[in-house]
């Protein structure tokens, strides 16, 4: 599983095409803190329909609070044939520490 640091993700967001930022936290968590441009699809809704809504050819970075749930979802997507999947190492918590110190934390 490819791990992407917050700083590396910040660099990737400045490139074209930028990766899809797939935030798998619950809606209440997403409402508190999120990376601009991310899409919220909670892990609790994970399934074939959810997987089919994503493009397996697009680079996808999976995000959660600390990196555990996103690692599981990224692994699921890899096994489903998604070739360009990465996990945000440390999640939005690490993003707040390393990239955006103004981001709310919970």
Image (cartoon, rainbow, N blue to C red):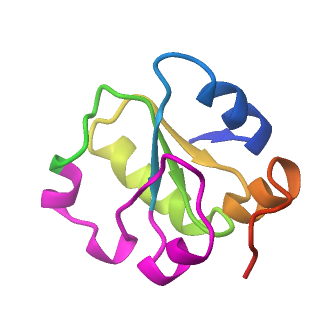
The x and y percentages for residue 15 are 58, 18
| Image quarter of residue 42 | bottom left
Of the pair 78 and 19, the residue shown nearer to us: 19
How many tags in the picture? 0
- Image quadrant holding the N terminus, namely top right
Q: Residue furthest front?
A: 102
Q: Which residues are magenta?
A: 24-51
The x and y percentages for residue 64 are 57, 64
Q: Residue at x 42, y 78 (%)?
A: 27
The x and y percentages for residue 30 are 51, 71
Of the pair 97 and 102, the residue shown nearer to us: 102
Is residue 43 a member of the stretch shown in magenta? Answer: yes
Q: Is residue 47 above or below residue 105?
A: above
- Image quadrant holding the C terminus, namely bottom right
| Image quarter of residue 101 | bottom right
Of the pair 13 and 56, the residue shown nearer to us: 13
Of the pair 37 and 92, the residue shown nearer to us: 37
Is 5 placed left or right of 21 in the picture? right
Is 45 placed left or right of 25 in the picture? left
Q: Residue at x 38, y 70 (%)?
A: 43
Q: Is residue 86 above or below residue 103?
A: above
The x and y percentages for residue 47 are 21, 65
């Amino acid at each position: 599983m490819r791990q992407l640091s917050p700083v590396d993700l910040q660099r990737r967001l400045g490139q074209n095409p930028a990766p899809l930022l797939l935030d798998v936290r619950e809606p209440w968590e997403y409402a508190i803190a999120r990376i601009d441009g991310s899409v919220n699809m909670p892990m609790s809704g994970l399934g074939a329909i959810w997987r089919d809504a994503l493009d397996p050819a697009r680079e996808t970075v999976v995000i959660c609070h600390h990196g555990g749930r996103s690692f599981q979802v990224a692994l699921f997507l890899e096994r489903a044939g998604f070739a360009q999947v990465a996990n945000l190492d440390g999640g939005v918590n690490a993003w707040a520490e390393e990239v955006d110190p103004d981001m709310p934390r919970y």
